[in-house]
Image: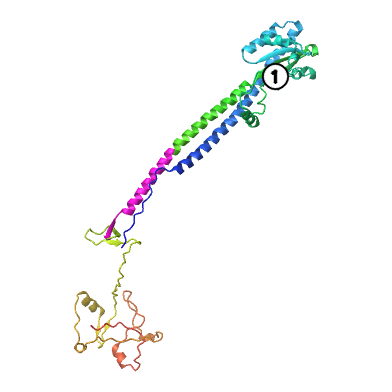
Amino acid sequence: MTEHEKVKIKRVIFPVGVFLLMFTAQSILGTAGVISYFYYSGKKNISEIENYTTNYSKTMAEAFARVAEFSYTTKKYTSLKTLFHEKIEENTIDEAFFVLNDGKLIVHSSTTAEKELMWNIANDEMAYNIDMILLPVQTKNSDLIVNNYNIVNKTVPFSRRDRELLKKYVYKNLTSTGWIFTKGIFPGGKPAGTVNFIISKDRIYGSIQSTIDQAKHYTFLVITVSVFLSFFVSLFVLFRYRSIQKNALNSAEYGYAPSAPGTAALSVKTADKTDDDDEVMFFPPDSNFIEPTMDFIIDDDFDENIVEEDGTIVSAESFRNARNTDKVTPLRKHDIESEEDEYITVELLGEIESEPEDELPEILPETVKEYIAPVINLKDYKKSINKEIRDAIPIRKKR
């Protein structure tokens, strides 16, 4: 017999696949949620800033227009200049000026700009778009006109690649650095000039940058949480797997004992038997042990009478009692002289023919076994002309 080889089971160190699967899924879902939230909230903030700026600019433009019209009528511009400086100090606007319909600069919020322009707005067409500034007068429109405006000394605080993405998906007017608000002055119904103020888009840029920073922060937080959560879940899976593996190994090794050199046998005991009872041995299918084949003789109890060769009828009950008590049945005298065992040969020919109904025996109780053919009386058989036996009857072998 060959010795059984032991299969080494690889010990799992860490379920890397479970960790990567959970980390990837959580990171993707978490990052997508963070980006979606801040994308829509960022666009909403930009819209709110634009609406707020437009609303308070209307009120401020009305105030500037009334003061400018009064100053133009009285030719005293001190109050208008004071109002411009106040709004500049409040950081409400970035620049304000009053221009006549011929381009002459009357009041500017910056004294330096007045000197550079030499009191004419047309002297610096790069910084001041004369067409936008005089548009209300040219169209004779007394309403407030708002346009995107490029402020010369202002830049967009994003890289070129980021500007393209933000302009395409977040804010289409990103490249224009401010707004210009223009309102015409019509004293006596005649166009006199326009009052203008410029507001930069620093608030919008700040809101976009803040949204990006928050999105990065929460994305990093989501990834960190995903790492720890995936790690702890992987540890749980690892411990659970090792526990199942240990239980499986213990179940496989439980009760194994070698019954012969090189052969492993599993000893199994029933719960109701004592330790003195024999153990039932189960041999593995891969062992070389050949289980002996045993032919069992099953004693079938019968309830019919036994007919001896000489015609003597022995009851089945007395025969069973004699067998259980190991009582030896004595041989008859004529059997002693014979050295060979004698048998009655029974030949079965053809199909079993049914006997007449009047000759059928009585119906036996349920406890008595039924035979195909009725019991043949030996005396009747000897007297019968037809010696052919068509049915078999139980005959005890001569001892």
In the picture shown, does residue 262 fall above or below 191? below
Number of callouts? 1
Where residue 154 appears, x then y in whole percent?
A: 65, 19
Q: Which residue carries the number 1 mark?
A: 180
Tell me the quarter of the image containing the N terminus: bottom left
Q: Magenta stretch containing residue 359, yes or no?
A: no
Magenta region, main secondary structure: helix
Does any portion of residue 269 appear in the rendered image? Answer: no
53 or 13: which is nearer to us?
Answer: 13
Tell whether position 254 is magenta: yes
The quadrant in which the C terminus is found is bottom left
The amino acid sitting under disc 1 is Ile
| Residue 92 x %, y % | 63, 16
Q: Residue at x 78, y 17 (%)?
A: 137
- Name the outermost residue toward the front: 2
> In the rendered image, which quarter is residue 214 located in?
top right
In x, y percent, where is residue 93?
Answer: 65, 16
Q: Residues within 10 Å of mark 1 (few under 14, many from 20)?
A: many
In the shown orientation, is residue 331 left or right of residue 388? left
The residue range painted magenta reads 231-260
The image shows residue 387, relative to residue 126, as above or below, that is below
Q: Find residue 191 and report its image quarter.
A: top right
Instruction: Name the quadrant containing residue 374.
Output: bottom left
Residue plotted at (66% across, 29% down): 172
Label 1, secondary structure: give it. Answer: strand
